[in-house]
Every structure is written in structure tokens, then in C-alpha cells.
Image: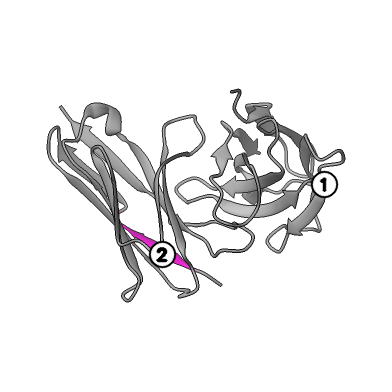
Amino acid sequence: GENVEQHPSTLSVQEGDSAVIKCTYSDSASNYFPWYKQELGKGPQLIIDIRSNVGEKKDQRIAVTLNKTAKHFSLHITETQPEDSAVYFCASSMEYGNKLVFGAGTILRVKS
Amino acid sequence: EAGVAQSPRYKIIEKRQSVAFWCNPISGHATLYWYQQILGQGPKLLIQFQNNGVVDDSQLPKDRFSAERLKGVDSTLKIQPAKLEDSAVYLCASSLLAGLQETQYFGPGTRLLVL
């Protein structure tokens, strides 16, 4: 079955710096890659997603890139703010069924 | 629009006891998911419903876990008997449809501690 690996497991950045989180997936049939943010005591919340027919997608300070050949996708957060501190999860799914396979998560700490 | 509701938010039980969690999805969402999130890990799908039918329960430990969605709206997840390794957050999510990469919306979760 699909396996998603996520790095790093923890990331500390200074406020205003950029943060990058990387994921790799195993199943070449995967074609949908969402990113979720989870704050303490809350459920994961979708922040951005990308489909396999697109190489990059941007939404204000957040961007996601996808390299289908290498089976890599990454989350980029620019101009980080303290409220960006949370756990971030990448995930993948194939077209049918919508089953998400999650990475292990990255704890992002933004120091002010 | 109201989000996914779950109850209880916290539950502490002893091993071998039984426990049930309840989920009310976003109104109109046909697909409902139960995930298990062990501390320090990403959520793992336990079961997926499309209306009141099961789409995927391949990772549900069926000897002790059961779930139902009788009227295609609310859902209940039960564990009987519980083991220490069942300590986790149980997340419910819903999406408008299944397939075509519909966004999944998560509830706040139920945090279970088995002693």
C-alpha cells in the first residue's frame, strides 16, 4: 500500500523566515496531495492541496510544489508568523475512494 | 456552516472496558471517515462510509472495533474490549462526496486514554 514519509519531524524558524517541509510517497498512482495544519486540541485543517496535473500552487504565504517523477512534494511557508506554529501533515490519495494516507507530521515552531 | 461535531471530547477507561464515540458530519456530506491518531503519528483511516454503506474498512480491527452509520448521517465507533494500545485521538471527518479528491473536513476528535 501507499507509504508517505515526511521530513523534518521538527522545525524551528525565526519569525519572518521561510519554512519548508518535504514529503515523499511510494505509489505512482497517487494523484492528490493535501496539506493539513493541526493545532493543539483541534482536528486537522486543510491549508492547501495540489493535484497531479499541476506542478505548483500558491495561496498567499503558502505554496506547494510537486515532482511526480521523483514522487516528492513540498510545503513552503514564507514570512512565518507565530500563529503558524502547529503540526503540519502531508497526505496523498488516489482518485477513487478519497482515502488519505498521512505522513507522520512536522512540528513547526516559529520563534518571535 | 457548522463543522463536524464529535463527542465526548475526552474519555478515560480501563482496559477490557467498552467505549463509544459519536460523530455528526457536516450537513449534506455523504461520506464519513473515522481515523485513529496515535500520539506523534499522522491519522490512520479506520473506516469510510458512503451514505450508510461501508466503502473501506480494511484497517479496522474488526475483532474489537465496530462502526455504524444507520441513517446515513450520524455515526458511532465502538471499541469492545479496549486495549492499552487503543489510547489515541479518534477523528471523524466528512466530505461532500467520495472520490475526485473531495476535501475532508475534520472534527476536533475524541481523546481516549486506556489505563
Question: In terms of secondary structure, where does tag 2 sit?
Answer: loop
Q: Chain of mark 2?
A: A
Marks 1,2: beta carbons within 8 A: no
Secondary structure of the magenta portion, mostly? strand
Give the quadrant of the N terminus of chain A.
bottom right
**Residue furthest top in the image:** B2
Is residue A85 inside the magenta stretch? no
Mark 1 closeness class: few <14, some 14–19, many ≥20 residues within 10 Å: some
Q: Left or right? Give the position of B80 relative to B4.
A: right
Q: Residue at x 74, y 58 (%)?
A: B55
Question: In terms of secondary structure, where does tag 1 sit?
Answer: loop
Q: Residue at x 56, y 38 (%)?
A: B105
Location of residue A110 by image quarter: top left
Amino acid type indicated by mark 1:
Asn
Q: Which residue in the structure is indicated by mark 2? A: A52
Amino acid type indicated by mark 2:
Ser
Rendering coords of residue A87 (x, y %): 37, 41
Q: Chain of mark 1?
A: B
Location of residue B99 by image quarter: bottom right
Is residue A4 inside the magenta stretch? yes
Please determine whether, in this image, residue A8 is positioned above or below residue A3.
above
Q: Left or right? Give the position of A63 relative to B101.
A: left
Q: Residue at x 74, y 50 (%)?
A: B49
Q: Which residue in the structure is indicated by mark 1? A: B52
Q: Residue at x 19, y 35 (%)?
A: A80
Query: What's the magenta region?
Result: A3-8
